[in-house]
Amino acid sequence: MEKAMLDLTPPSMENTPPVLADVEVVEEQQENPGQAVVDPLPLNEEFNPPVSSTPEREQRENTSAEKRCKRLQAEKRKLRKQNKNLKKKLAEMIKEKETARKSEMRAKERVGLSEKFKPKGGKKLGTERKLAAVSFLTRDENSRLLPGKKDTITKNKVKKQRRVLTKPLTELHALYNSEMKKSLRLSYRQFARRRPFYVTEPKTKDRDTCACMEHENVHLLANKLYSRELLKTKSISELLGMIVCDPKNKACMDRVCAKCCFEEVQFPETESSTEVTWEQWKRVTSTMKMDICEMFVLEQVPEACNVHCTLTF
């Protein structure tokens, strides 16, 4: 006995699409029986589908892409600038390296030449030169010993009595080179460097006695003539050497030597006479508070100096 089945499926769930006014429904056969049937869209004017957000998204993406492109271009320009600066620094470093290499090569060449031509026994010769300079400067005719108890000088915990030079250091240097043999001769800088620390230049307080008026007048005259280019030197020792045979000979210094008693300091020849004015010390007598005393006054002495002018001592 067959049982009857009641179909309770509502009409909205059936596969048959609803029939709309003014719309033609085209039925198509399904190629695949398992494919779902899609309802056709209504074509009436009142149907407004929702607007898609795709154009706004594309616009935002384009804006972000432009910003990223600009940022990358700015970074590219910055990197190019840094690369240019680095290349410039590299070129400078290469140039400095080449300069240093050349300097090193020249230094090596100089060291090689100095070692090649370096005399044997350099330390021994330097010690001999130093001892010779010290011995020369500490001689009584070149420096005098100060007798005062406070006339001492200390260096590196070594205390010595002071000695002051009797002549300028330039004159002593010339005299040293004239006396010493060739191997012991020194330049002026080396000679000054080897001077002992207790041999110093004379100061005003080092003089305990008065100066001789005649000697000071000769110094003033020689300095003035040297400044006017009438003398080649202002050293009294050199001027004495021009008019005497031997400064150590008493007869020559007393002007009784038959060879040099008539020698005089010669001046350069000039077409016309030249008036020279220099300072001289002069002894004068003054009266102060009913007391008569003698004093020295520095005065200017004008005198015409021509071709026949001579300087005598």
Image (spheres, rainbow, N blue to C red):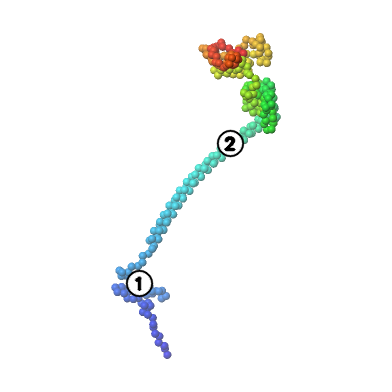
Residue at label 1? 40
Which quadrant of the view contains residue 14?
A: bottom left
Secondary element type, mark 1: loop
- In the rendered structure, the answer to whether residue 2 lies left or right of residue 123 reads left
Q: Position of residue 146 (x, y in %)?
A: 68, 24
Q: Position of residue 174 (x, y in %)?
A: 63, 22
Residue at label 2? 103
In this rendering, the count of numbered labels is 2
Q: Nearer the viewer, residue 189 or 310?
A: 310
- The N terminus lies in which quarter of the figure? bottom left
Q: Position of residue 259 (x, y in %)?
A: 65, 10
Q: Residue at x 65, y 24 (%)?
A: 164
Which quadrant of the view contains residue 132?
A: top right
- In the rendered structure, the answer to whether residue 172 lies left or right of residue 17 reads right
> Circle 2: is it few (<14), some (14-19), or many (20+) Cα within 10 Å?
few
The answer to whether the residue labelled 1 contacts the one labelled 2, judged by CB atoms less than 8 Å apart, is no
Tell which residue pokes out farthest to the front in this image: 290
Of the numbered discs 1 and 2, the one sitting upstream in the chain is 1
Q: Which mark is residue 203?
A: none
Q: Nearer the viewer, residue 26 or 183?
A: 183
Q: Residue at x 41, y 88 (%)?
A: 3
**Amino acid found under the numbered disc labelled 2:** Ser
Q: Position of residue 149 (x, y in %)?
A: 69, 26
Q: Is residue 119 visible?
A: no
**Amino acid found under the numbered disc labelled 1:** Pro
The residues tagged by marks 1 and 2 sit, at their Cα atoms, a distance apart of 94 Å
